[in-house]
Image (tube, grey):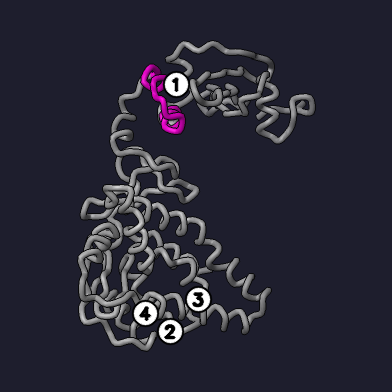
Amino acid sequence: MQHVNSWRDVAAATGAADRTAAEEGVRRAYRAAGLAEPERILWAGSPRAAVEIVEKLTDAGRSVREEVRTRPWAEERRRTHYELGPAGWSALWSATGARLWETTAALAERIRAGVVADLASRPEDEGTIRLLLLDAVLGQHDAAWLAAFDGRGDRLAGLGEVARNAGWWWPYEHAAVISERPAVLHRDEAGRLDHGDGPALSWADGFALHAWRGMPVPAEFLAELASLTPARIREEENAELRRVMLEYYGYDRYLTESGAEPVHRDETGVLWRIALDGDEDVVMVEVVNSTAEPDGTYRTYWLRVPPSTSTAKDGVAWTFGLDGAAYSPLRQT
C-alpha cells in the first residue's frame, strides 16, 4: 500500500521538474527498448507547449512510443499474468493500479481535451492535434500502471524515473520532448478537478483548465461567481452552468433571497422547490437538527432530494433509502 500512496503522490505532484533526473530516465527508457539515446531532449512548459514543439519538428524521425512504453508494458503484464495467474493478476491490479486508474485517466483526458481546445483553431485541425497527443507517454499520469509494475521489471525503471520527475513526454527516433509538471492542482474529495477561484489545473506557461466539481467551465464564468444574484442565476440558459451557480451560491441562500415559498411542511421539515427553465426542478428539504449545538442553537440542514418528491417526509425518507410510508424514526438526531 505504501508504494501505491507514493504513486498517488507522483500523479498529483506539482512544481518544477527535476530535469536532470527526467532526462536520465528518458535515456534509460530508450536503452531498455534497445534504441539509441535521443540526440536532443527539448523541454516545454506544458503539454500544450509540447504539442506546439512537436508540430514543428522536422527531423525527429518516427515516434518510438511503441518500443519505449507500449511493448515493455505489454510484455511485463504478460509475464506478471503468467507468474501470478488470472486471479493473482486481478488481485495485484485491484490492490495497486485500480486505486489510481479512475482519477488519473480522467485527468489525462481533461488535459487532452484542453490541449485540443486551445490549439485546434479550426474543426479540421482537431484530428492532427489528437494524433500528436497519442504519441505522448503520460509520465506522472501513468501512475496507475507504474504502481502495478513497481519493482517488477528493470525495463520499466526509466519510465518510472521520468514519471517521478516530470510530466508528459514525446519519444521520437532522434529527439524527445518533455513537458513540465503542473504548477497548480485543485481537486475535490472525489479527486475531480475543482476550484471556484481560478484554474483547477495550470502550468507556469499559462496553460490552464477550469472546472467545478469535475465539470469543465469557462474561466470568465468562474470570475462571475463572486457577484452572482438570484436574477443572474435564473437568466443563465445553460442548465449545467446554472446548476454550478446554484451550488456556489447556496440553495438555501437562493431560496431566501429569491422569495421562494415552501410547498409542503410536516413534522420532519419543510419542502422547497425551485423551478428552472429547461431543467428539472431543484427540490430541497429544510430540516432542523434535534440536538442542540454547544451554544444552545439548533443547526438547519438542506437536503437535496429527487424532483418527484411531494412531501418533506418523503424527502427525508429518501435520504435513508426508504419511502415515506416506511419512515418512522424512533428518535431524530
Going from N to C along the chain, the mark reached first, 1 or 2, is 2
Residue 242: percent from left, percent from top: 43, 28
The residue wearing badge 2 is 155
Q: CA distance from mark 4 to mark 3?
A: 13 Å
Residue 66: percent from left, percent from top: 41, 76
**Contact, CB < 8 Å: mark 4 with mark 1?**
no
Q: CA distance from mark 2 to mark 4?
A: 7 Å
Work out whether 49 lies above or below 139.
above
Q: Which mark is residue 331?
A: none
Q: Residues within 10 Å of mark 3 (few under 14, many from 20)?
A: many
**Contact, CB < 8 Å: mark 1 with mark 3?**
no
Residue sitting farthest toward the right: 326
Going from N to C along the chain, the mark reached first, 4 or 1, is 4
Report the residue at 25% width, 66% height from top: 54
Q: Magenta part of the protein: which range?
A: 230-246
Q: CA distance from mark 4 to mark 1?
A: 53 Å
Helix, strand or loop at mark 1: helix
Residue 104: percent from left, percent from top: 45, 59
Callout 3, which amino acid?
A: Phe
The residue wearing badge 4 is 158
Task: Report which quarter residue 171 is drawn in.
Answer: bottom left
Q: Which mark is residue 149?
A: 3
Work out whether 239 lies above or below 94.
above
Q: Which mark is residue 253?
A: 1
Q: CA distance from mark 1 to mark 3?
A: 50 Å
Going from N to C along the chain, the mark reached first, 3 or 2, is 3
Helix, strand or loop at mark 2: helix
Helix, strand or loop at mark 3: helix
Residue 219: percent from left, percent from top: 30, 39
